[in-house]
Image: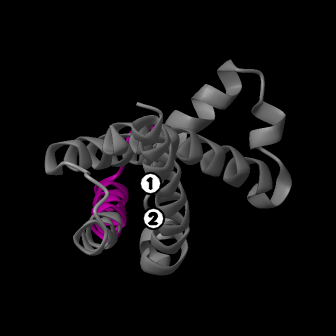
Amino acid sequence: MMTETIAAALRLALTLALLYGLHSVADHWVQTHTDAVTKGQTDNDGHATRAGLAALTRHVATHTLTLAVVLALIAWRFPLDWSPAAMSAGLAVNAASHAWADHRPNLRRLAVALGKRSYYDMPGGAGSYALDQAWHLGWRVISALIISA
């Protein structure tokens, strides 16, 4: 029993470490500059523009594909007992939470509601970037729990 518990904990830790590293690659290297600067584009009412929605969709698709391909290669090479259903569900949760946050008005509204408006609006975007990455990290933990279950 203890061996199974340790194996499950190690599988979770490895899954989270992989998602952590892969997120950085997908978010900063795979994402195009055009998608990065366009994905949050909104009209005057805060609704995504057609260009913003297209960029967001491309970004989330390439981000999820990057994670899926590398996780599939890892699962093929090592016996981690990730089920395809759990991997699909974890990646879907990650993709949905990623898309929600990368539609910028959503994350800003949350920051304002939680009293973090001045932090989110810091000059240079440092606060919004930090809150964005913290959001993604929290959801990566949830995704890792789903994938490694």
Q: Residue at x 70, y 48 (%)?
A: 128
Q: In front: mark 1 or mark 2?
A: 1
Q: Residue at x 35, y 65 (%)?
A: 67
Q: Is residue 21 visible?
A: yes
**Quarter of the rendering containing residue 78:** bottom left
Tag 2: Cα neighbours inside 10 Å, few (<14), some, or many (≥20)?
some
Residue 52 counted in the magenta span: yes
Nearer-the-camera pick, 59 or 84 = 84
Give the percent coordinates (x, y) of residue 57: 29, 58
Specify the label residue 15 is tagged with.
1
User: In the rendered structure, which disc, 1 or 2, sits on the residue that comes first in sequence?
Assistant: 1
Question: Dividing the image into 4 quarters, which one contains the C terminus?
Answer: top left
Query: Badge 1, how many Cα within 10 Å: few under 14, some, many 20+?
Result: many
Q: Residue at x 71, y 20 (%)?
A: 114
Location of mark 2 (residue): 38
| Chain part drawn in magenta | 46-66
Q: Position of residue 93 (x, y in %)?
A: 33, 39
- The residue that appears at 37% across and 57% down in the rendered structure is 52
x%, y% of residue 44?
Answer: 47, 41
Quarter-wise, where is residue 134 in the image?
top right
In the rendered image, residue 36, in percent from the top left (x then y), is placed at 49, 68
Tell whether 116 sits left or right of 36.
right
Q: Is residue 129 above or below residue 9?
A: below
- Is the stretch drawn in magenta largely helix, strand or loop? helix
Name the secondary structure under disc 1. helix
Q: Amino acid at mark 1?
A: Thr
Figure colour scheme: one colour
Q: Are marks 1 and 2 in contact (CB under 8 Å)?
A: no
